[in-house]
Image (tube, helix red, strand yellow):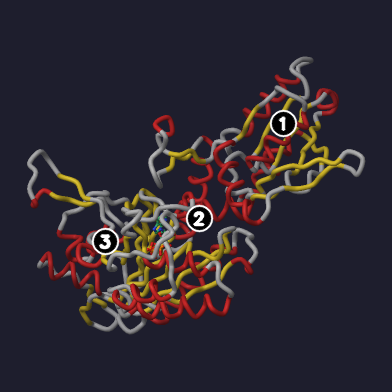
């Protein structure tokens, strides 16, 4: 059984062992903070994506989706402020040459303090960060004697800004004009398409544009598994509203997004809101939805009131009018924007952490343990495992019949090898909500044994009812 401390490590190992997540290019020893999703991971990730996409687009008549390119005109990033502002304060240890994000360094130190002292230190840090007081941050680090984890010394450089965007060259000529960026957020692809979508979709404010796609950040301290990656995926929605109504919509989206999280059946005590102390250059209000991971409460989603900053900037830099004519009030304006931005990989980690359980099962005489992923059925990579008890007596043929009935509707898995208990255990470990066993009685009366993952209870039902049982659980 894992302790609190090594629970996170156990989850990481589980993800690898059961084909959820592998380190990228592992045969070459991996690439730091880059990961690949395996056969079960890619299914789970796709199901999370679909669940978000459906709740945003299909269930909101005034939200539509787009899929913009990763490469964008380089001026996009000047207009958005990323060239000048998308940076984190960093500090280097002169002895080990190790570079730290200042907030991570101080937060790491605070973890080992008593609660009261830690809160005081973090409040001071937040204030200095909000004021961009780099000299103050350095003094704080020195005053508290916060040491480098490698060299153990307090020999620090000054605090400096470090831009997080990756750049590359477009075409074969290397000059400044051909330098382009890998997008650090998907939002700008939405802003530059505001008019295209509004006009072609005849959208009326308030309306939203949703997008799922890759984003890239040259994170300096990329650790904690898929919590902080250099290549990751975002699920973002920009909601365009009439100026003056942004506060109302901000509150509404705060609640709506929290409800989405809770709709997955996750314990509300594991969630909390955290208001931003330091607002980004474009925001007039911002809050994070935090989840209690085994490594503590951490951000999984941000809700930002982005004002009219982005559209106005693109209007100025492109010299094209980006406005909306509101027929209800007979006025032209640049809409205000409420953004909801969630990391798909972070949501994946949340779902796995929430689902992972090590359980004592069996009897007093014969104790046993199992690892089970209690995934919501709608997100589980495999919905149904079909298991003939033996490889003979016509049982595989019956099982194949059930496979053919079910596989056009949801993801099924067929297996005839090993003892049935072992097969159940393997399905528990990947979170399959239902296993069906086909045995000799099936031949006589057409019934099968359904075994439920969470309760491990078994019941006999007609084989013809299996498909509906699963369908009801996943919708
Ligand atoms: P953080 O403070 O953790 O760096 P952020 O506030 O910079 O995150 P946003 O720019 O608001 O994050 O991005 C929205 C969401 O994208 C975050 O809530 C998070 O879920 C996800 N995200 C951001 N950076 C990363 C990353 N490096 N790896 C994985 N997911 C990320």
Element at badge 3?
Answer: strand
Q: CA distance from mark 3 to mark 2?
A: 27 Å
Give the image location of residue 378, x and y in percent: 60, 49
Q: Dividing the image into four quarters, tell me where ligand 1 lies.
A: bottom left
Please count the marks in the image.
3
Residue at 48% of width from left, 49% of height from top?
Answer: 225
Q: Are marks 2 and 1 in contact (CB under 8 Å)?
A: no
**Residue 376 visible in rendering:** no
Q: Based on the displayed image, in which of its 4 quarters is residue 184 positioned?
A: bottom left
Which residue was labeled with disc 2? 347
Give the image location of residue 246, x and y in percent: 36, 79
Q: Earlier in the sequence, mark 1 or mark 3?
A: 3
Which residue was labeled with disc 1? 423
**Residue 443 visible in rendering:** yes
Q: CA distance from mark 1 to mark 3?
A: 50 Å
Q: Is mark 3 within 8 Å of ligand 1?
A: no
Nearer the observer, disc 1 or disc 3? 3
Q: Earlier in the sequence, mark 2 or mark 1?
A: 2
Front residue of 367 and 154 = 154
Q: CA distance from mark 2 to mark 1?
A: 28 Å
Q: Is mark 2 within 8 Å of ligand 1?
A: yes
The label shown at residue 162 is 3
Residue at 22% of width from left, 82% of height from top?
Answer: 331
The label shown at residue 138 is none
Give the image location of residue 297, x and y in percent: 54, 66
Give the image location of residue 16, x and y in percent: 55, 38
The residue furthest right is 365
């Amino acid at each position: 059984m894992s302790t609190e401390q090594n629970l996170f490590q156990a989850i990481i190992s589980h993800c690898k062992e059961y084909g959820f997540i592998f380190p990228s290019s592992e045969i070459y020893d991996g690439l730091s903070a880059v990961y690949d999703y395996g056969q079960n991971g890619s299914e789970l990730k796709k199901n999370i994506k679909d669940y978000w996409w459906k709740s945003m687009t299909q269930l909101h008549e005034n939200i539509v989706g787009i899929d913009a390119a990763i490469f964008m005109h380089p001026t996009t990033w000047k207009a958005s402020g990323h060239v000048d502002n998308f940076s984190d304060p960093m500090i280097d240890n002169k002895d080990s040459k190790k570079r730290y994000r200042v907030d991570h360094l101080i937060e790491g130190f605070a973890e080992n303090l008593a609660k009261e002292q830690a809160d005081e230190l973090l409040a001071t840090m937040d204030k200095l960060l909000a004021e961009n007081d780099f000299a103050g941050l350095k003094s704080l680090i020195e005053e508290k004697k916060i040491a480098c984890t490698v060299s153990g010394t307090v020999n620090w450089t000054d605090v400096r800004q470090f831009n997080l965007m990756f750049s590359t060259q477009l075409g074969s000529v290397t000059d400044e004009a051909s330098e382009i960026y890998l997008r650090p957020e998907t939002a700008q692809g939405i802003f530059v398409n505001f008019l295209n979508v509004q006009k072609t979709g005849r959208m009326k404010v308030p309306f939203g544009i949703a997008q799922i796609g890759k984003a890239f950040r040259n994170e300096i301290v990329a650790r904690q598994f898929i919590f902080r990656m250099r290549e990751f995926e975002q699920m973002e929605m920009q909601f365009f509203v009439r100026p003056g109504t942004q506060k109302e919509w901000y509150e509404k989206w705060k609640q709506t997004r929290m409800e989405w999280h809770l709709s997955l059946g996750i314990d509300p005590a594991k969630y909390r809101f955290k208001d931003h102390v330091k607002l980004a250059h474009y925001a007039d209000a911002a809050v994070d939805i935090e989840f209690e991971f085994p490594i503590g409460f951490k951000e999984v989603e941000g809700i930002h009131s982005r004002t009219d900053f982005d559209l106005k900037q693109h209007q100025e830099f492109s010299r094209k009018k980006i406005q909306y004519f509101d027929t209800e009030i007979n006025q032209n304006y640049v809409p205000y924007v409420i953004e909801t931005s969630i990391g798909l990989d972070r949501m994946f980690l949340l779902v796995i952490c929430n689902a992972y359980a090590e359980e004592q099962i069996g009897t007093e005489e014969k104790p046993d343990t199992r690892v089970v992923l209690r995934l919501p059925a709608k997100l589980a990579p495999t919905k149904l495992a079909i298991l003939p008890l033996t490889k003979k007596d016509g049982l595989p043929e019956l099982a194949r019949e059930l496979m053919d009935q079910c596989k056009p509707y949801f993801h099924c898995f067929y297996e005839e090898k090993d003892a049935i208990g072992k097969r159940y255990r393997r399905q528990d470990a990947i979170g399959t909500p239902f296993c069906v066993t086909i045995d000799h009685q099936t031949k006589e009366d057409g019934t099968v044994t359904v075994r439920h993952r969470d309760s491990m209870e078994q019941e006999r039902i007609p084989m013809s009812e299996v498909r509906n049982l699963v369908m009801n659980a996943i919708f």
